[in-house]
Amino acid sequence: RELIEICRREESAIKSLGELQHKYSILQRQYNGSTQLTEDALHKVSELISLSQTLTNERDDAIQRRENAENELSKLQLVVDKLTEESGQRTREEIDKIEKKANENIENLLNELHHMEKERCQLAIQLEFYKTNNLSHHINDVNNEGKSVLNVNTTSGDSKPDCLLDTFRKRAIHAESLCNELKLRLETECNNKEKLVASKQIEIEQLNEKNKLLIERFEYNELQRKKNENHYNKQNEVLFNSQLQLNSLKQQLEAVQKSAQVQITSIKQSMKMQEVEYKLKIETLEKVNKLTDENWRNLLDKQQIVSK
């Protein structure tokens, strides 16, 4: 019976040892799984940190590009405003000067023309007067004088009206010529005024074209600035989401690390307890084996004594 009891205890100890080894294997797998989960979480955190750094760099680049675009837009706006103001003011001043000068010249020419027309009319009236009244009056005066004197005076009288008529005729022709010349100068001055205004109008159109190009460039840069701003906002959104994921993974990692630490502590405690239990069972088995050996020896000794 003692031998059977010893065998039963030995089988129980072996079974307990197998169970301990099985539990140890399960705990080891759990520990390895926790370790792998921790490593995966750390790897994911590392990837997210790298992605966050990349997005941060891209965001900084986007901010710098946006600032550069805004500075360029401000400079372009200043240039456009300055050119528009200067060109408009300069063109207005030049056109005003040209029109003022041309108007003064035209006014002077009109005054001269009016004066010459008036003088021509006066000369024409005087010429007609001398042709009719004055010439007859001079002839009557000459006929009333003495016969001897008549011949002389008639000759000089005929000569005097002829001279006056010729003088008035020349003055009238000269006045007519001056009027024609003044009309030609007036027409030339008007044409010059139109040409100058047209040339300034061309300059205005050229300046407007330059302003149009600058405005188009300004609008293009404004569009690029808006695109960069949208890209910057998207990058911020992605960065914000990545930061949320990173924080979530950090929390998961901390939870996994705590869980793993708890499991490791529990495994260590369980292993220590099982080690103590295992040592006690081994010691018990050793004692049982020792008693069994002694019993076998005593039994053999008794058999030897009986056989003698």
Image (cartoon, grey):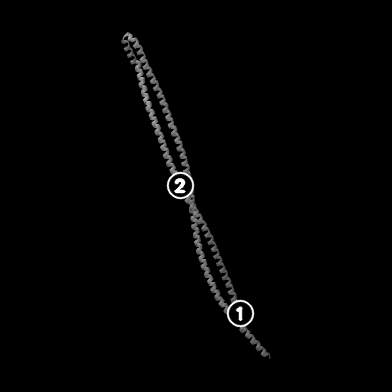
Q: Position of residue 153 (x, y in %)?
A: 34, 12
Residue 8 x/y as whole percent: 61, 80
Return the x and y of residue 3 as percentages of the image width and height.
62, 83
Q: Quickly name the residue at label 2.
A: 75
* Secondary structure of residue under mark 1: helix
**Marks 2 and 1, how far apart in space?**
96 Å
- In the orientation shown, which residue stands out farthest toward the right? 308
Q: Nearer the viewer, residue 95 or 303?
A: 95
Eye-nearest disc, 2 or 1: 2
Pick the residue in front: 127 or 57.
Answer: 127
Tell me: residue 293, above or below residue 267.
Answer: below
Say few, some or many: other residues with alpha carbon within 10 Å of mark 2 (under 14 / 14 to 19 / 20 or more).
few
User: Is the C terminus in the top left, top right, bottom left or bottom right quadrant?
Assistant: bottom right
> Is residue 162 rendered to the left or right of residue 59?
left
Single out the residue that lies furthest toward the bottom: 308
**Above or below, comparing residue 285 to residue 133 in the picture:** below
Give the left or right position of residue 158, taking residue 305 as reference.
Answer: left
Which residue corresponds to the image point at 35% horizontal and 19% vertical from the top-left? 126
Q: Residue at x 61, y 79 (%)?
A: 10
For label 1, count other residues whose C-alpha is less than 10 Å away and answer few (under 14), some (14-19) or many (20+).
some
Work out whether mark 2 precedes mark 1 in sequence or the reverse, and give the earlier one.
1
Residue 174 appearing in the image: yes
Report the label total. Answer: 2
Residue linked to disc 1: 10
What residue is shown at x 35% (from left), y 13% (from top)?
156
Q: Amino acid at mark 1?
A: Glu
Image coords of residue 16 (percent x, y): 58, 76
Between 165 and 299, the one lying in front of the other is: 165
Q: Amino acid at mark 2?
A: Lys
Q: Which secondary structure, mark 2?
A: helix
**Residue that appears at 48% across and 44% down:** 217
